[in-house]
Image: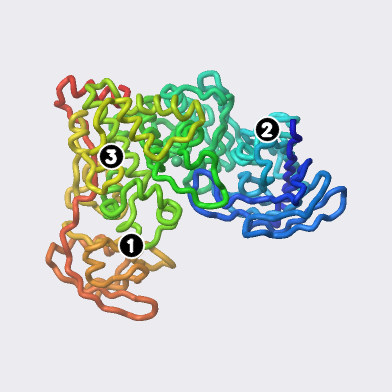
Amino acid sequence: MSEAHTYRIWPKDPAAHLFEVRVTVAEPDPDGQVFAMPAWIPGSYMIRDYAKHVVSVRAEADGRDVAIEKLDKNRWRAAKASRALTLVLEIFAHDNSVRGAHLDNSHAYFNGTCVFPAVVGQEERACNVDIVAPEVSFGKRTRVATSMRRGSAEDYDFGGYTAEDYAELIDHPVEIGSLSIGEFDVQGIPHAIAIRGNTRVDMARLCHDMQGVCEQQMSLLGAPLDLDRYLFLLHAPGSGYGGLEHRWSSSLVCGRDNLPARGDEGVSDEYRTFLGLVSHEYFHLWNVKRMKPAAFTPYDLSQEVHTGLLWVYEGITSYYDDLALVRSGTITEESYLELLGQIMTRVIRGSGRRRQSVQESSFDAWTKFYKQDANATNAIVSYYAKGALVALCLDLKLRSETGGRVSLDDVMKDAWARWGETGEGMPEDGFEQLCIDVSGEDLGDFFNATVRGTGELPLESLLHGHGVEYCLRRSSGRKDKGGKPSPDNKLPTVWLGATLKTRGGKPIFSALMNGGPAERAGVSPGDELVALDGLRIDIAGCEARTRRYRPGDKSELTVFRGDELISLRMNWSEAPEDTCYLLLTDDADDSVKSRRGDWLGQ
Ligand SMILES: [Zn+2]
């Protein structure tokens, strides 16, 4: 057996946010060992070039310095060494996101992609990992939380850990600090949540609710054979939202007050969002961490990797995340329909859905979805949001056309058997072909229209067949996310066709809808709104005054573009019905109601 690599990580200077990492290679490449830092992290499809945070790098063998040369932005080569070679790096860590590494006097968090270079050519070798305690204390009861398999380390402690190979090494984020830990089982498999942040959460309630959601997800595809533990790492600052999936864990961020306090009852909108995030990242344990596109098998972390299937991995996951909340009884049917209505509203409000398909959105994720400019609303569609709606349509269509014999659940079970349990990559046309195979239905037109096309989704008819009415109305204002009937009965009849954001205390046009009144008047992204018809105005004031105009009315808009004051003539136009909500059909007949019950698991 070839000798394992050793990775030693030490929070060397927390005040300066510096980790020291030492990588020891027992049998370095005789032509000079190459080391490479990943350019991106799986699950977040953007080039991040983690090597840019490497502050210093040197190599040594037998206590003597070994020359090292930089080959390109992410790689180094050490001079020939005939015995164990150690690369020593200092790495700056001040990115508090789930994709980064962060170190200060209170805690350390890292993803392996940010701190561990690959030993090029020997990525298959096992890794021994030594997580070393800082010299300063992170506070009493400092604990180490990671899904990495323990070697000599005690539970939640510093010391020795192991990974089977480099791919696994970088798939276990690590959190070190004063953590609150809750534990629960799902189908006999130990699960834990480790929370950073002073949340004063009702941990028993949190574990109970998360267990219900995880059980529901687990009941769909079953426990993967190699899943013998699972860990949620949660950072709960004042505000924030995000998550990143891993094979045995996930990293989450949510606002600390979104979590339930002792004595709280019911599921607040914020807590529902958090449970949806838990559900989403957990579903990824199957969908993308084990079952993945052929393009990701294995991941090439040196450059962009393109696939048109991200809508399958993120869209279908976004569909099952909230669905698991209603199927598990965590939220009501009405609450679930509110969430669906909000997703529909997000998609409808962007005219980019008419320009970009979810397949194209998946393919161009690296440069479009992850690098959105002021025109994003007109040019791109989210493979998450529209992908979730394609999944919904596919599910309801399969249920309708096969008389309830086949659903998306069955497709996912077959997909799991074919690509999840085998570890084989899903070819680009694999998912569509599988849907056809499993259902026996001709789905070519459906995929042409919804996945490769940019037409409207057949939501209204499919939902109607499942006892749900699809309704549209105008928006009541910027805080109106949809999902509910109108909060007031006097909706504005006109719109600006623009999004305003406050920047530096000033109202700034951040996005202009193609064809909307503001764009037609000549407003540009970045313009500062100064006055409407000669009256100084802020965002709230603008929203209130909009209600005083009717389609066809004319106004003078005054804006600053840079330091130039500009006066523009604008024609108000009718506000579109771009806000969606769904209602249960009370008078649906029993067969329709039973179809709805099958779908929502009631
Ligand atoms: Zn996701």
Judging depth in this view, the residue of 246 and 337 nearest the camera is: 246
Please tell me whether mark 1 or mark 3 is closer to you in this view: 3
Answer with mark 2 or mark 3, whichever residue precedes in sequence: 2
Callout 2, which amino acid?
Tyr
Q: CA gap, disc 1 to disc 2? A: 47 Å
Farthest residue to the right: give it. Answer: 63
Farthest residue to the left: give it. Answer: 552
Judging depth in this view, the residue of 348 and 226 nearest the camera is: 226
Please name the residue that numbered disc 1 is placed on.
511
Circle 3: element type: helix
Please tell me whether mark 2 or mark 3 is closer to you in this view: 3
At a point 76% along the width and 45% down the height, the residue shown is 28
Circle 1: element type: strand
Q: Quadrant of the N terminus?
A: top right
Quadrant assignment, res 594: top left
**Where in the figure is residue 217, as x and y percent of width and height?**
43, 27
Please tell me whether mark 1 or mark 2 is closer to you in this view: 1
Answer with mark 1 or mark 2, whichever residue precedes in sequence: 2
Please name the residue that numbered disc 2 is placed on.
156
